[in-house]
Amino acid sequence: AYRVFGCKGQAGNDVLIAAFNQAYQDGANIITASIGGPSGWSEDPWAEAVSRIVDKGVPCTVSAGNEGAEGIFYASTAANGRRVSAIASYDNVQTPTLIYSSKYQIDGDADTKFGYVPSDPASWDGVTLPAWSNSLDPTIPNDGCDPFPANTPDLSKYIVLIRRGSCSFAQKVNNALAKGAKYVIVYNNNAVGAIPMDLTGVPAGSIKAASMIDGTTGATFINALKDGKKLTLKMVSPQKTDSEVSTSNNTITGGALSTFTSWGPTWEMDTKPQFGAVGGNVLSTYPRALGSYAVLSGTSMSCPQTAGIIALIHEVRGTYDPELIQNLLSANANPQLFNDGTKFYDFLAPVPQQGGGLIQAYDAAYATTLLSPSSLSFNDTDHFVETLKFKLQNTDSKKITYKITHAP
């Protein structure tokens, strides 16, 4: 690995080019970078340098970018380089969640473990406080959606419990904040499961920690308070406690293009991205000081996965030929239906969003039909290319009949 970022988290073309050149000179078989910035021209200096390394026989994968909200024609450098593999992101079909361990105590009884999912912020270190809830009904549908009553105590002395549902997490937290709350735990309106909460709209620095717990644990807490018992929560920060992974099926966007994945093509009408891999909701390693593991999303996740798949293809086929590998991955990828983040539609996501589709590692490694090139570009209306050629080659010992169709 080659460090390119300074303390301010930025890197210029000179440093990036030097890093790629050093990797090439050191004999790297595959070079990958989860870095980029908007640039539509393939002649960008870094993109040109990476393209030349690809021409020397070294496959290079670069993140397509995470600016999907910007729309079409928003390619990134050096993913925009010719023959460079720009990698899109697809959402995981299962959503992993890291659950961290803390303890609670009811009326001085023995401590009992429970799990929580931290949001941002999560400064739970050393926090031991009694719990308080505005509602003692564990089935209330709109808990915390209205301002808390005038007789609410100073909530800075408590960990506030609020049930999920009917309004945004930020609205619930802000209503608690108005009464002095610094620590908030939302319990799920489902018996199992918890997620990190989006607290956009909560003033920065106003609360110290917010997290979610499952509905079963939440009901236990609320029922204890309802019975007049003292509930004390003994929180431990994510960096200092045990964790385990819980997964749930992603039935909304699982298998679809991540809404954040950047769209091509380049300003020269070259196809970008080439294809994609799983980059949405990925369990990943993380700095030990920050907990060792995290669930992350971005083309920074899908890009290194693709580099690993290229290594597997080399093990099977014995080649690092960038053109062949790009052709194999593109031709054997599975195009996915379009999804706007809320539902699937009955048409494929466009090529400028997904390229060839979701990579199929096994199919690419063992394919006997070779299709080239990896994509076709007919340019724009002023310089339209009327005729383009592609090549199909059967490397199997058996005859194969091909049926070519078009999916609009």
Image (cartoon, rainbow, N blue to C red):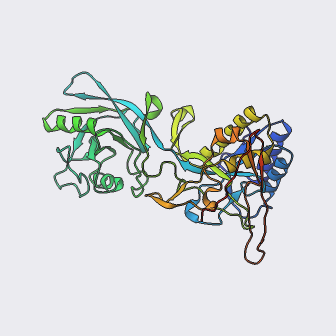
Q: Quadrant of residue 126?
A: top left
Q: Which residue is situated farthest in the bottom direction here?
A: 382
Residue 307 visible? The answer is no
Q: Residue 157: x, y in percent?
A: 27, 41
Q: Quadrant of the C terminus?
A: bottom right
Name the residue located 43 percent from the left edge and 53 percent from the top edge. Answer: 204
Image height of 129 relative to 358, above or below:
above
Q: Residue 179: x, y in percent?
A: 26, 52
Q: Is residue 191 left or right of residue 118?
A: left
Foreground residue among 268 and 226: 268
Q: Which residue is situated farthest in the left direction here?
A: 227
Name the residue located 20 percent from the left edge and 49 percent from the top edge. Answer: 140
Name the residue located 62 percent from the left edge and 49 percent from the top edge. Answer: 276
Foreground residue among 353 and 200: 353
> Could you tell me how many numbered marks the image carries?
0
Q: Residue 149: x, y in percent?
A: 18, 55
Foreground residue among 149 and 351: 351
Q: Is residue 132 left or right of residue 35?
A: left
